[in-house]
Image: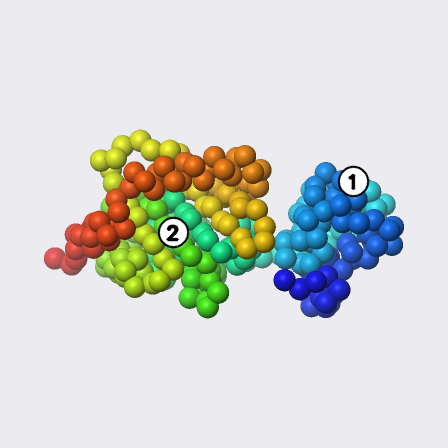
Amino acid sequence: MAAPNQLDPYASPRTFYGSELRREREARGWTQEQMGERVFCSGAYIGQFESATRLPQPELSRLLDGILGSGEHFQRLCHLARKTRHAAYFADAAELEQQARTISEYAPMLVPGLLQTEAYARGLTRSALPSASDEEIEGHVRTRLDRAGLIDEPEGPDVWALIHEAALRTPVDGPGVMRQQLLQLSGMGRDHRRVTVQVMPFVEGPHPLMYGTVLLMTFADAPPVAYTESAHSGQLIEEPGVVAKYRRSYDLARAAALSPKASLALIESAAKDYADP
């Protein structure tokens, strides 16, 4: 992680935000801890913004403008820095994915985004955004595939995908697309050294994560976080006690699921069901 004084302030809106925050803090003789106390967060959290390792947050920027008497300076910089190809509610989670050492996801109805094929991602996007233009659809698909490239990076995260059997049985864009997707999913589980796939079978019944999508991330030098998502909204959860509860629920669900070996056999069996007649 680059130290704040090593950052080029003009490299990006985010680094400019960080350099401005550091400049204002040091002009007042405050430590990061002292500034954090004034805006109800830790000094380490302030340090993440100064070093540009974390996207600026709208509410924090409003509080900073208040204590610094800077009008809407940091709120405007925040708006500029948060421009992203991702949905606004997912922007912070997408950013943290790039820094994560481990990513553990439970997906109740869909193959997780990091493991999707292009055709499968396109089919999902068309169904979710029926009024979108072809250009918009392709933009979303490209963004999702770019995310998936994270897995193959030399220092990429370990990925644990826990998928409900419903995701295997819900056809997306025809049998050919589904067969290709399931074969890729099983291939990743078999051949990729950092990817583990498990399936929660229908016969298991209720389980601790049955209420929706959950994404858990851990980091080398920051506390773990959880992210939950529904159709048009998502929530990043950083409260340690709540994150710990999600971790516990994930561990219980993972223990109830099929073993990785049995899961891959079920995925490959489902892929055969989508074979062309």
Could you tell whether 211 is left or right of 17 in the image?
left
Between 167 and 261, the one lying in front of the other is 261
* Residue farthest top in this picture: 206
Q: Position of residue 124 (x, y in %)?
A: 37, 52
Q: Residue at x 43, y 37 (%)?
A: 248
- What is the three-letter code of the residue carrying label 2? Trp
Between 14 and 237, the one lying in front of the other is 237
- Measured along the vertical axis of the image, is residue 30 above or below residue 150? above
Residue 177 seen: no
Q: Residue at x 29, y 41 (%)?
A: 257
Q: Position of residue 47 (x, y in %)?
A: 70, 53
Which disc, if any, is residue 47?
none
Cα distance in 3D space between marks 2 and 1: 39 Å
Q: Check disc 2 and report the residue beneath it.
A: 160
- Measured along the vertical axis of the image, is residue 61 above or below residue 152? above
Q: Quadrant of the N terminus?
A: bottom right
Q: Position of residue 251 (x, y in %)?
A: 38, 40
Q: Position of residue 233 (x, y in %)?
A: 51, 41
- What is the three-letter code of the residue carrying label 1? Arg
Q: Check disc 1 and report the residue beneath it.
A: 38
Residue 107 quadrant: top left
SS under mark 1? helix
SS under mark 2? strand
Between 267 and 216, the one lying in front of the other is 216
Q: Residue at x 22, y 49 (%)?
A: 262
| Label 1 Cα neighbours within 10 Å, binned few <14 / some 14-19 / many ≥20 | few
* Residue farthest front in this picture: 220
